[in-house]
Image (cartoon, helix red, strand yellow):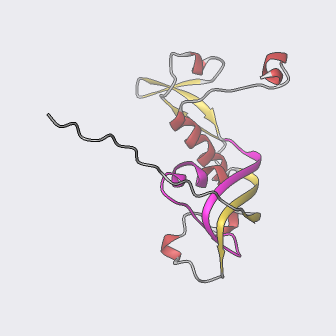
């Protein structure tokens, strides 16, 4: 907060889908793309606008980060990653857009033990693997006694 308020840190707000596409584009070597999302709003301020088939679109730049840090469920020793549940949504494009990607994983398995069809991110994008210790939270169910008439 101090850094933002003092001007040391700059923030850029993006719609969620635009952020995901910016990361995917950057990780795929695509410098920019046009989107309708944000046209006519503060999101579009200062950005190039182009008209296609009578509709306005704004130019969004792909994101290339110096460092990306992701969390995965499993990895093999070559960096192939398997994510669980909603971690599959943003972790792959986040990993891809980093010049260096560090993956924290719950389990590192031997090379060849992951089914190739179940690998969500190839090891070519992962530069470091760290096996973390993870707290397994246990849900507690609280119910009230049924009232009798």
Task: Give the x, y percent position of residue 103.
Answer: 70, 60
Kindly identify the residue that appears in the image at 64 percent across and 70 percent down.
107
Left or right? Give the position of 117 relative to 147.
Answer: right
111 up-or-down from 17: above or below: below
Residue 48 colored in magenta in the image: no
Of 121 and 138, nearer the camera is 138
Residue nearer the viewer, 79 or 42 = 79
Q: Going by the image, does 42 lie left or right of 86?
A: right
Is 64 part of what is drawn in magenta? yes
**Whole-percent x and y of residue 24?**
59, 48
Q: Quadrant of residue 34?
A: top right
107 is higher (above) or lower (below) than 67: below
Residue shown at 58%/20% (left/top)? 44
* 75 in relation to 149, above or below: below
Q: Residue furthest left?
A: 149
Locate residue 82 relative to residue 132 in the image: left or right: left
Tell me the magenta residue range.
63-92
- Residue 120 is drawn in which quadrant? bottom right
Q: In this view, does 26 lie above or below 148?
A: below
Task: Please tell me which residue is depicted at 72% across the width and 26% down the height of the picture.
Answer: 11
Query: Considering depth in this image, is 97 or 59 the residue closer to the camera?
Result: 97
Where is residue 37 drawn, in percent x and y? 49, 28
The quadrant of the picture occupied by the C terminus is: top left
| Residue drawn where x is 51% and y is 54% of the image | 138
């Amino acid at each position: 907060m101090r850094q933002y308020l003092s001007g040391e840190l700059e923030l850029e707000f993006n719609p969620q889908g635009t952020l995901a596409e910016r990361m995917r584009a950057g990780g795929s070597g695509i410098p920019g793309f046009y989107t309708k999302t944000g046209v006519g709003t503060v999101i579009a301020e200062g950005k190039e606008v182009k008209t296609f088939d009578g509709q306005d679109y704004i130019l969004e730049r792909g994101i290339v980060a110096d460092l990306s840090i992701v969390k995965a469920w499993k990895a093999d020793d070559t960096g192939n990653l398997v994510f669980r549940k909603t971690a599959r949504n943003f972790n792959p494009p986040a990993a891809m857009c980093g010049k260096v990607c560090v993956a924290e994983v719950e389990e590192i398995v031997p090379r060849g033990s992951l089914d190739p069809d179940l690998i969500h991110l190839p090891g070519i994008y992962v530069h470091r693997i760290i096996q973390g210790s993870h707290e397994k939270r246990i849900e507690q169910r609280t119910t009230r006694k049924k009232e009798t008439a």
